[in-house]
Image (spheres, grey):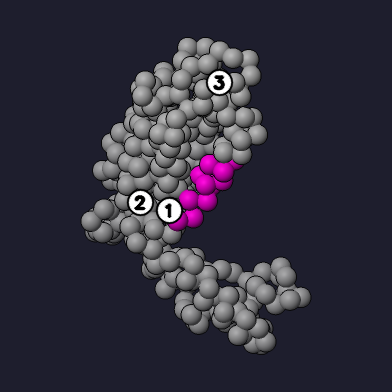
Amino acid sequence: MAIEEGIADYTQDGTVDLKGNPVRRSKRGGWLACSFVVVYEVFERMAYYGISSNLVLYMTNKLHQGTVKSANNVTNWVGTVWVTPILGAYFADAHLGRYWTFVIASIIYLLGMCLLTLSVSLPGLKPPACNEANVADCKQASTLQVVVFFVALYILAVGTGGTKPNISTIGADQFDDFEPKEKAHKLSFFNWWMFSIFFGTLFANTVLVYIQDNVGWTLGYALPTLGLAISIGIFLAGTPFYRHRIPAGSPFTRMARVIVAALRKWNVQLPSDPKELYELDLEEYAKKGKFRIDSTPTWRSVHLEETIIISLVFL
């Protein structure tokens, strides 16, 4: 009986520890592990929005750029921030795994934040002060000052590309979908996850923006940088409690294979029994920590879903 209970305590979704060994639910994962992830997100969102929320104002008032140019520069940077997670997700899924991709990206993220703080603090790197009513009349920032500032911003963007797509999935990995209680807890985790995002954003858009406008940019940027350093420390402190997923190869390759196979099998006859779409028993899928994609009547008129399912079976 004790042996059976011990076996049942192991996760069934394929998660392992950092050394690749199977993990017990009672030792790793669950709310204990997720508490580190949720607290991390509060500080990280505070750091990110502490920089991005007032960025246009800094470029116009301190770099002495025009409003249109400043807005365009911020838009380009924000676009980069939202594109780089594609690469971060790829490296996590295909090569390094989520944990190590996240850790490496966090270091890059922090380096970018530190350089950004220095660029608004050191006399040789921050732009000259200007009290002119018209920004065009101000002495422009030097090439070095502009380059350092934007290099810091884009280093930060690269860092967020590795952290943004992986931190929420790391949190989700702490709950086993094959265990009913943990599956229910995963839904609750995402509620707390969104709360942490909103709380960190609220703090940044009120307290940090006020400090930047009324106290100074050095303190206004140093606090988000310190917050990010704290968040990384909190995440690393939870390392002994995390569950991990082994990299499963490039998702783009799998997507391409499904699309190609679906096109080739467009006219394959659909079985009368939907269960015949699968070549393996349900127990086999459970052993691999995966769920079957059940057939539904959706889009039956074009046979798209059935075609894709048939393609998945024979890949």
Q: Position of residue 1 (x, y in %)?
A: 26, 58
Q: Secondary structure at mark 3?
A: loop
- Between 246 and 120, the residue placed more toward the observer is 120
Name the residue that disc number 1 marks: 88
- The amino acid type, in three-letter code, at marker 1 is Gly
Q: Position of residue 85 (x, y in %)?
A: 48, 51
Q: Is residue 204 left or right of residue 11?
A: right
Few, some or many residues within 10 Å of mark 3 (<14, 14–19, 20+): some
Residue sitting at x 61%, y 24%: 136
| Whole-number angstrom distance, CA of label 2 to CA of label 1 | 7 Å
Q: Is residue 278 above or below residue 30?
A: below
- Start and end of the magenta stretch? 75-88
Q: Is residue 145 left or right of residue 18?
A: right
Few, some or many residues within 10 Å of mark 1 (<14, 14–19, 20+): many
- The amino acid type, in three-letter code, at marker 3 is Cys
* Mark positioned earlier in the residue sequence (2 or 3): 2
- Give the quadrant of residue 132: top right
* Mark positioned earlier in the residue sequence (2 or 1): 1
Tell me if I can see residue 250 in this picture. yes
Few, some or many residues within 10 Å of mark 2 (<14, 14–19, 20+): many
- Between 64 and 259, the residue placed more toward the observer is 64
Residue 116 painted magenta: no
- The amino acid type, in three-letter code, at marker 2 is Thr
Kindly give the residue lying farthest to the right in the view shown.
Answer: 301
Q: Is residue 249 above or below residue 279?
A: above
Number of labelled discs?
Answer: 3
Q: Is residue 250 above or below residue 302?
A: above
- Tell me whether circle 2 and circle 1 mark residues in contact (CB < 8 Å): yes
* Mark positioned earlier in the residue sequence (3 or 1): 1
Name the residue that disc number 2 marks: 101
The circle on residue 138 is 3
